[in-house]
Structures are given as C-alpha cells and as structure tokens.
Amino acid sequence: RVTDPLDTDYYGVFADIGGAERDAWSRARVLISEYGDRSAAQWDAGDYDISIVRRMGELDLFVDGIEHEGLTALSPLAAGLINMEISRGDGSLGTVLAVQGGLALRTLALFGSDAQKAQYLQPIARGEVLGSFALTEPDHGSDSVSLETRATRAADGGWIIDGAKKWIGNGASGGVTFVWARVESPGADDHGKVRCFLVPQEAEGYHGEPITGKASLRGIHQAHITLRGVTLPANAVLPGSHSFKDASTVLYATRSGVAWSALGHATACYEAALQYSQQREQFGKRLAAFQMVQERLTQMLSELTAMQLYCRHLADLEASGGLRPTQASLAKYHNTRTARRIAATARDLLGGNGILLEYGVMQHMADIEAIHTYEGTESIQALLLGRDITGVSAFA
Ligand code: FAD
C-alpha cells in the first residue's frame, strides 16, 4: 500500500513500485510537501509563482519519457506517478509539468535542430527557461488543424510570423514559445504546411497577455498571444517539424499525462471525502456510519480503482512500445470524466465546507474542468476513438 495516510490503492495497483519509479514519485512528494500549504492561497490570489518552475527542474520532474543525450529519461510509469502525485497536491503545478515538460521540452526534443537543443534543452529541463507550446488560436481550438497563424518566408530566408494564439501556458513568462504556424512560401515544398518555430518571447512583435477571470488552474497563467510581424532568422524553424501531424504527435504523448493527472485529482477528492465522513457527525453519528455514505464512498473507490488500472496499463503499453494514440485517448476520455464525477460526489459529501478552498475539493473540482478540455475535449477523444473503432471519420 503506497498512498498515505489513507488507503486508496485498494488492489495494490502500485504496490510493486520500487527503484527509479519510487524515487521519481518521492521527488514529486518533496515538491508538494514544500508547496502544499501555499496551494489554496496561490490559487485564490490567481498568483503564478514562477520560481516553482526552477524548483521542479531541480527535482528533475520535467524530463518525462524523453530520450536525449544529457537528459535522464524517466520511464512512462515514473513520469505517470509524478503527474499523479503533483496533481493530487496541486492542479496548477500539474499543468506546469504538462506545459514545460510534456509540451515544450518534448517538442524541442522531437523536432529541434542540434543547435536549438544545445541552447535550450538543458535550461528548459532544469526550469531555468520557461517553455510554452502555442497551437490553439482564438478561432481554432478543436479544429486547430485549420490554424491561421502565418509564417512567411522572407527574401533572406528568414521568417515573419503573424497571427494570434490563445490559452498558452507560460506564454507570457519571458521564456520561449514553440509556435505552430502555416508556411506561406509559394513554390516551396513546405508551402501551406504547418511547422513549428522557436520564438523568444522578447522578440519584437510578440505580445503575451495573461488571461484573467479564470476559475480553474488559477496558480498558473495561460496567455493570449499576438504575433505581429515577428521577424526570425532562417534557423528558427524546428527542422523536424513538417506538418500538423507533428503537433498531433506531441499531443498524443501528453494525453497519457492528462489521464494520470485526472487520477491524482480524483485521489485527492476521494481521500478528502473519506477523511471528512469519518470526522463529521450528524444525527449523533459519523457520516461514515450511514449506509448511503458508505455506498457513495464505495462507488468512488470503484471508479478510482478503474482509473488506476487504466494508468498502470497505459504505462506498461508505452514501455513495451505498443501504445497506440487512441489508447491514450481512451484513458484520457475515461479518466477526466470519471474524475469530474468523483470530485462532484466528494464536494457533496463535504456539505457546505465542500465549497471552501481550505478543504481542497473545490479547487480540484474546478481544476479538473480545464484538464477535461485541454489536449482534446471529451468529444474530440470520442471522435478519434469512433473513427478508430468504426473506420468512419465523423469529424467534419
Ligand atoms: P472548441 O473547439 O470551441 O469546443 C467547444 C465545444 O464544442 C467542446 O465541447 C467541444 O468538444 C465541442 N466540439 C468541437 N468540435 C466538435 C465536433 N466536431 N463534434 C462534436 N463536438 C465538438 N492550447 C495550446 O496550444 N497550448 C496550451 O498550453 C494550452 N493550454 C490550455 C490550458 C487551459 C487551462 C485551457 C482551458 C486550454 C488550453 N489550451 C492550450 C487549449 C485547449 O487545447 C483548447 O481549449 C481545446 O482544444 C478546446 O478548444 P476550444 O477551447 O477552442 O473549444
């Protein structure tokens, strides 16, 4: 039994974890033990303390399953456990992990040139430079394949980027943004293709504005970015990025991370509900002594255990090289919708206190809403799966 103080791993799904995996998990716990007390206050204030990114880098939490010289790759299981544990402690930090490691570092490792990697791989992995991944646009979310940001090839071989991006984590942090844009270069092989560009955020014409009024993931900023005539050298393009499929490759990989993150949120909610029901007394006895409460806790545990099994199996499939993208979609589909249900039940079991930030559940419940949407909504995962199992595309 590995979670403490409460017993959520009912089948012992993670009971055999040892070695590098346990070590990775412990490092995530160190972060949460340092940050946990501040979590609700940061969220309440809508404050993103970017010094935490450096600390996460020091604890070697960003590298994920990325193989690259000089970086110690984590196994899929180790990366998953980190994701679970951090989201169990704080959803905003879970998203920092997803953006800095899952999206930015992975994009650079997969598609970057040797020179780009030499300059940025280590600093991003260590959290010294903040990285962001800009695919979504104000008018193109689920259909980001239709993105309108343009990269025009200039006469000297350089690039001029024009467009807008929305919802970009770390997009106004002073770091670098991996911008996906459509090439405008009539006659060239890549004309009309979507490619990725490394854009330093201090570049002239780049403007990132944190989105205000968010009621989810308030401990990290997402930015609305405008790119107006941003002039870049020829070597700003990531040479391994050739089409929209490459952006999709990154998202396929990070969907597993979202499934693990949902498990972390749901674990925290179940634990809070169990603990509260054992302490709170109504009608002269503890809530936990009522049959209906026990049934609801059992329902939550059964769903949580299914999420754990999905995650463990995902990690095993990925480690064997046999994970198909739609299998990650299935886990994301199942786990975020199940986490929503578990959070809602937990919130209800805490009564009025369930809406107070100090009890934790409401913050998780609000944060789950964002992870349910990003990296492909529930309906988009369903369409990907529907196409796979029926052979018919229902996208458009
Ligand atoms: P829409 O695409 O407008 O969808 C609205 C609704 O319509 C959804 O329910 C959707 O499922 C449904 N829908 C759409 N098409 C169909 C269809 N064909 N059939 C049935 N239903 C459909 N993007 C980045 O590039 N980088 C980031 O770092 C990033 N971080 C994010 C962080 C947060 C907190 C959030 C909320 C978003 C982030 N995103 C990021 C963007 C995210 O990926 C998009 O929000 C998501 O893909 C959905 O796009 P949308 O919000 O435009 O919704």
Image (spheres, helix red, strand yellow):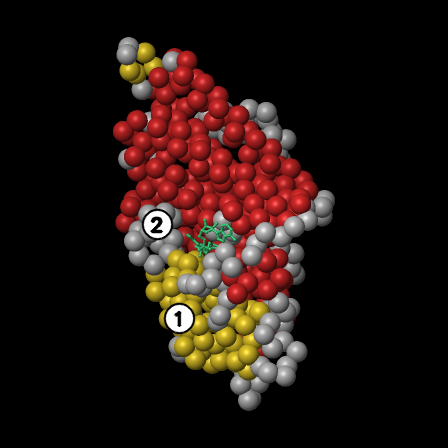
Q: Position of residue 367 (x, y in %)?
A: 40, 44
Which residue shows up at 62% across the image and 55% down it? 66
Q: Position of residue 25 (x, y in %)?
A: 54, 40
Residue 69: tell me if it is visible. yes
Q: Nearer the viewer, residue 39 or 257?
A: 257
Instruction: Name the disc covering residue 218, or none.
Output: 2
Q: Residues within 10 Å of mark 2 (few under 14, many from 20)?
A: many
| Distance from mark 1 CB to nearest ligand 1 atom below 8 Å | no
Q: Which residue is mark 1?
A: 226
**Seen from this angle, which residue lies furthest bottom?**
155
Quadrant of the image for the N terminus? top right
Residue 20: tell me if it is visible. no
Task: Give, as a three-letter code, the residue at label 2.
Answer: Arg
Q: Is residue 251 above or below residue 290?
A: below
Which residue shows up at 41% across the image and 77% down it? 228
Q: Report the side of 193 relative to 348 (left or right).
A: right
Quadrant of the image for the C terminus? bottom right
- Total marks shown come to 2
Task: Give, as a three-letter code, the residue at label 1.
Answer: Thr
